Amino acid sequence: MLWSREQVRCGIFDSAIQRKNKTKSPQRKVSSYELELFLEVGGESHVNGEVFPIRRGMLLCARPGDIRYSEFPARCRFLRLTPQEEDDPCQRLLRSLPTCLYLSDDKIRTLIPLFTKLGAALTAPGDGEDLDLLRTNSLLFEILCRVKGLLEEEKSAPLAISTAVRDAYEYINEHFELDCTLEELADAVHLTPNYLHTVFTRQVGKTPLALRDERRMQQALLLLSQGEKSIVQIALDIGFCSQSHFNRVFKKHFGMTPSRYRKEIFFEY
């Protein structure tokens, strides 16, 4: 099924022009597919509770049902698609994309001309309905295929860990027993909590607090296997304020309580 002009919008959004004196957009439930290529450093984009710092090369994909808003400034090329009842390759491609991807400058330059051509095709006088549909749909599909290709390139490329993320990673490894919040961890490495959470999760593959809990569980297994300390003492030693909290986290990771784990390993002996 082809996409009509009424179902596709493509252009440039600039908060300084279209949202004068506004510091952020209202929170809303997304009703269309929204693909945005940001052209310069700005504020933050929030999608389903996740925070993405706006910088040149950020490619954001929001889907119907997502909850989002943005903190300005923001300037981007945008593409909007009204969902079709019948599934098609464009919708499948959009559903397969991550919410956010940061592209290098050379990759940005391959996308901007395509956004420009599609925007021009959608606003140009018609040369005939069939020809217009084929032209706009061809450009639309080319953009989405190019984005998908760039995503595959990013997946296969070695991931560069930033200095800030490396510092946070080492800090967690050395201080996992401290009962610190995300805010305190971010302060220790001189970042904002939202930014640390976003870049750490993207580069490491898990949140800072998830890594902390993982390190705690590794230490818990060691201490439980030694059999020298009580479970409540182990909980306190690795940073939990109570045994009940330790029990919940341990069971989430291993499917059993610490006491059950200890009984099983000593039964094997």
Image: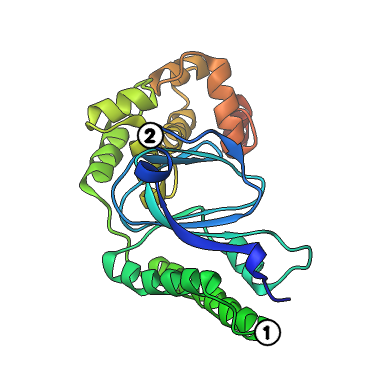
Q: Is residue 100 above or below residue 10?
A: above
Q: Amino acid at mark 2?
A: Asn
Residue found at x 39% / y 42%: 198
The residue that label 2 is drawn on is: 194
Of residue 178 and residue 131, the one placed in the foreground of this image is 131
Instruction: Kindly tell me whether residue 152 is visible in this rendering.
Output: no
The residue lying at 64 percent from left, 53 percent from top is: 32
Direction right: furthest residue: 85
Q: Nearer the viewer, mark 1 or mark 2?
A: 1
Q: For the N terminus, which image quadrant?
A: bottom right
Q: CA distance from mark 1 to mark 2?
A: 47 Å
Q: Residue 80: horizontal and vertical position, in percent?
A: 57, 58
Q: Amino acid type of disc 1?
A: Asp
How dense is the environment of label 2, judged by Cα within 10 Å: few (below 14), some, or many (20 and up)?
A: some
* Residue 24 appears in view: yes
Q: Secondary structure at mark 1?
A: helix
Residue 130 numbered mark, or none: 1
Left or right: 30 as drawn, with respect to 53: right
User: In the rendered view, would you say 241 is above or below 188?
Assistant: above
Q: Quadrant of residue 209?
A: top left
Q: Determine the image quadrant of residue 133.
A: bottom right
Residue 2's disc is none
- For the point 48% across and 26% down, the residue is 227
Residue 224: x, y in percent?
49, 29
